[in-house]
Image (cartoon, rainbow, N blue to C red):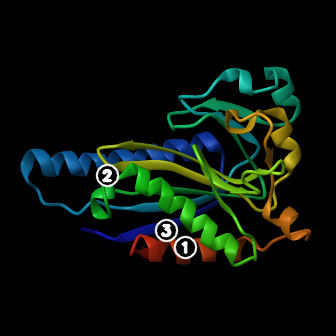
Amino acid sequence: MNKTIQLQDLGTKDFKETWDYQETLFKAVLDTKIKNRREGAGLATDNHFLFVEHPHVYTLGKSGHLSNLLLSEAQLAEKGATFYKINRGGDITYHGPGQIVGYPILDLDNFFTDIHKYLRFLEEVIILTLAEYGLDTERSPGETGVWLGVGTPFARKICAMGVRASRWVTMHGFALNVNADLGYFDNIIPCGIKGKAVTTLNNELGIAIVDEKEVKAKILKHFSVLFEATFIV
């Protein structure tokens, strides 16, 4: 089993370009697995982890409803935002500046073959990361992601998640609101969940800007421990 993960920080990159790049990496891992199965090649499969920040974009998962986007095509253009229907699970979400997006493209045969466990581990990475900032975050029953104030009138989501998997290879991932502009969430029903708010790390801490490089380092630290993995650049 290969438990090394190739890390790339793509900086700011268009959503569609990044999606296409994910698909390329995803297909390469799948092709290796198919070759191993058909030919007994015994080749190691690669694992990847992409950090990225997207320009303003709304994405709708395959189980989502277009009615959860509250903007017309013209209004999207006015706000400098784009929109895509994509092949991950989940409903609608927003990506934009000030948000840390992580896309693990892993062959879970290298780790564990359990999608439920995979999602819980992704959540735990974020929960442990935010605990380092003094935030008590948690899961909300039946709702993937990381939340504050679960079970209260002040429930609010700080990290959204949605993944795709085929032959135990994953893509897509999580979006953690660090310094994001919350106004863009007013244009959707986030994740299709009415009556619940969205928040950011800097808002919860009551400061102007959180060091995103520091947050990324904490995410990688907890990810490597939980997945018993080593990142290589």
Q: Circles 3 and 2: CB distance less than 8 Å? A: no
Side (left or right) of 93 relative to 115: right
Residues at discs 1 and 3 in contact (Cβ within 8 Å): yes
Please state the horizontal and vertical placement of residue 183, each as a whole percent of the image.
89, 44
Residue that label 1 marks? 220
Dot 2 crowding, Cα within 10 Å, few <14, some 14–19, many 20+: many
Q: Could you tell me how far apart the alpha carbons at marks 1 and 3 are, in whole angstroms?
A: 10 Å
Relative depth, front residue between 109 and 134? 134
- Closer to us: mark 1 or mark 3? 1
Q: Which mark is residue 7?
A: 3
Q: Residue at x 69, y 64 (%)?
A: 137
Residue 143, image quadrant:
top right
| Residue 25 in sight here | no
Q: Residue furthest front?
A: 151
Say which residue appears at 62% left-offset and 67% top-offset: 127
Residue 59 vs residue 36: left or right? right
